[in-house]
Amino acid sequence: MLNQPILSNHDLRDEIKAYWSLRAETFDSQPGHEIFSEDERSAWHALLRKHLGDGTGKAALDLACGTAVVSHLLDDLSFKVTGMDWSEAMLERARAKAKKRGRQIRFLMGDAERTMEDDNSYDVITNRHLVWTLVDPVACFREWHRVLKPSGRLLIIDGDFVNPSLVSRLAKKLSALLVKVGFGGSGQQNGPHTPALAQTHQNILSRVHFSQGARAEAVVELLKQAGFDKITVDTRLGAIHRSQRKNFSFLKGLERATQHRYAICAQKHG
Ligand SMILES: C[S@@+](CC[C@H](N)C(=O)[O-])C[C@H]1O[C@@H](n2cnc3c(N)ncnc32)[C@H](O)[C@@H]1O
């Protein structure tokens, strides 16, 4: 007899939503999430411009927008931006930030896997740090393909946070050792900041599609299955990592810079 409750996908999605809602309060105080220097802002602008071009006259949907960091970058580049997230706690902060900065960004509560948006309605879809946590990526990519206009572009910014490189592993171990022997603090971090949240994170990660890590090549394969073409993988994110490094301890910065992080740009047929 089963003594464990059987969790449906719906339960897992609810857990993901609840997890991020708990992270909302501190999200913007963590480097790697909110932007803390003009150097970093410029580096992000350059990445978005390189793949999406100028935003004038173009509608952008920033999925899983969280506190709207990427939505603001798109707004800076003149896109007409809609930010969507399913966590009300994240959206509350996103709305407050846009109001404070006087930005006309529209926010919707919704599921990135079922946006409820019209066919062919956006020129651009973006998401940062969403794909690694998707329950059904192919269905989701099909949904994004449906919502994009012909020739519309998708930009995924993500990484494999499960399989660290050798340098990354060594940096992490050394960092933990230094903290243990009392040399320096743990530095700024951007992960779950309590043991209970870390446990929840692990629990969720073990059940999502990319539980073994979201490698760019695997994401590309699924994008092709969903009908995208002209797919490029950009791992030249050095300018962003260098600018973020100032806000991390040396080892934490090294760990991040040596992770498999990427931007994938894909297009819908014209
Ligand atoms: C790591 S945060 C990233 C936030 C933002 N994209 C950024 O980079 O600053 C992940 C966000 O994804 C949202 N999220 C996860 N799965 C989602 C889904 N299926 N639909 C909508 N939002 C989702 C969470 O609520 C959370 O705000």
Image: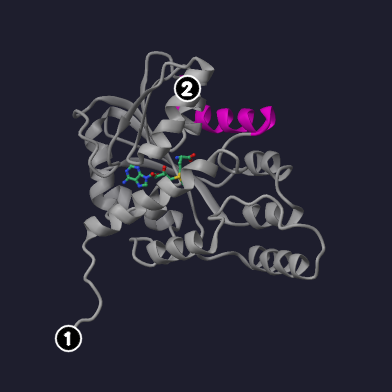
Rendered image: mark on residue 61: none
Farthest residue toward the right? 183
Here the colouring is one colour
The quarter holding residue 153 reads top left
**Earlier residue among tags 1 and 2:** 1
> Is the magenta region chiefly helix, strand or loop?
helix
Q: Position of residue 7 (x, y in %)?
A: 23, 66
Q: Which residue is more in the foreground, 224 or 206?
A: 206
Where does residue 90 sit, x and y in percent of width and height? 42, 38
| Span shown in magenta | 36-54
Q: Amino acid at mark 2?
A: Ala
**Residue 75 in picture, x, y percent from top left:** 47, 21
Give residue 1's mark.
Answer: 1
208 or 54, which lies in front? 208
Kindly tell me whether residue 58 is visible in this rendering. Answer: yes
Please give the residue where the numbered disc 2 appears in the rendered image: 98
Q: Quadrant of ligand 1?
A: top left
Pick whichever, 131 or 94, lies toward us: 94
Tag 1 and tag 2, C-beta contact below 8 Å: no
Specify the quadrant that holds the C terminus: top left
**24 falls in the magenta region:** no
Q: Nearer the viewer, residue 154 or 99?
A: 99
Task: Judge whether 85 appears above or below 2 on screen.
Answer: above
Q: Which element is circle 2 on?
A: helix
Other residues around mark 1 within 10 Å, as few (<14) / some (14–19) / many (≥20) = few
Residue 205, above or below 38: below
Badge 2 density bin: few <14, some 14–19, many ≥20, Cα 10 Å:
some
Amino acid type shown at disc 1: Met
Q: Is residue 48 magenta?
A: yes
Question: Whole-percent x and y of residue 54?
Answer: 47, 19
